[in-house]
């Protein structure tokens, strides 16, 4: 397995099967060109098998932390360390960029995701509730 930083919308389009919805080139370009946005792809024999995206968030009294936006691994490659390797890659970048920590929101009952995040050193602090606004 090889992990590479995504730099083009074409790379993301080639990995579209890993995302929840079709990749929109204009959104892909905007994500990739925005400072503090990061996306890594995992490849097996030059075929994309997983991805992790992260966004650096900065606050005046806290500094910078990495928000692990999304992690996706193709079904045949799950439980093989792909997710953990992607998380480790994003965490290393976060440290390199001076982030004081990293966090991710996880749906309750998503035991597979929780196990993956724990295997990469994450800890469930049990204090988070997600509140959303739908503008669409």
Image: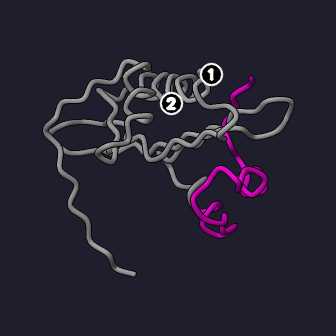
Range covered by the magenta-colored residues = 1-30
Q: Horizontal placement of 49 versus 52: left or right?
A: right
Q: Which residue is mark 1?
A: 80
Query: Which-is-in-front pick, marks 1 and 2?
Result: 1
Most foreground residue, 67 or 123:
123
Residue 92 vertical position relative to residue 9 in the rendered view, above or below: above
User: Where is residue 10, by image quadrant?
Assistant: bottom right
Q: Residues within 10 Å of mark 1 (few under 14, many from 20)?
A: few
**Residue at (28% x, 45% y) in the render:** 108
Most foreground residue, 47 or 41:
47
Q: In the picture, which quadrant includes the C terminus?
A: bottom left
In the rendering, at what x and y percent does residue 99 appear?
A: 35, 29
In the rendering, at what x and y percent does residue 1 appear?
A: 74, 23
In the rendering, at what x and y percent does residue 9 appear?
A: 72, 57
Which badge, 1 or 2, is on the more N-terminal residue? 1
Most foreground residue, 74 or 57:
74
Q: Which mark is residue 90?
A: 2
């Amino acid at each position: 397995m090889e992990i590479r930083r995504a730099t083009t919308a074409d790379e993301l389009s080639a990995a579209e099967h890993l995302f929840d919805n079709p990749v929109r080139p204009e959104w892909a370009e905007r994500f990739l060109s925005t400072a503090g946005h990061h996306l890594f792809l995992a490849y097996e024999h030059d075929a994309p098998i997983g991805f992790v995206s992260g966004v650096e968030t900065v606050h005046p009294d806290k500094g910078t932390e990495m928000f692990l936006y999304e992690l996706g691994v193709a079904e045949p490659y799950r439980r093989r360390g792909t997710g953990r390797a992607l998380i480790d890659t994003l965490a290393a970048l976060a440290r390199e960029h001076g982030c004081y920590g990293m966090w991710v929101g996880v749906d309750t009952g998503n035991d597979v995701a929780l196990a993956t995040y724990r295997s990469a050193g994450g800890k469930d602090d049990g204090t988070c509730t997600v509140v959303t606004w739908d503008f669409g």
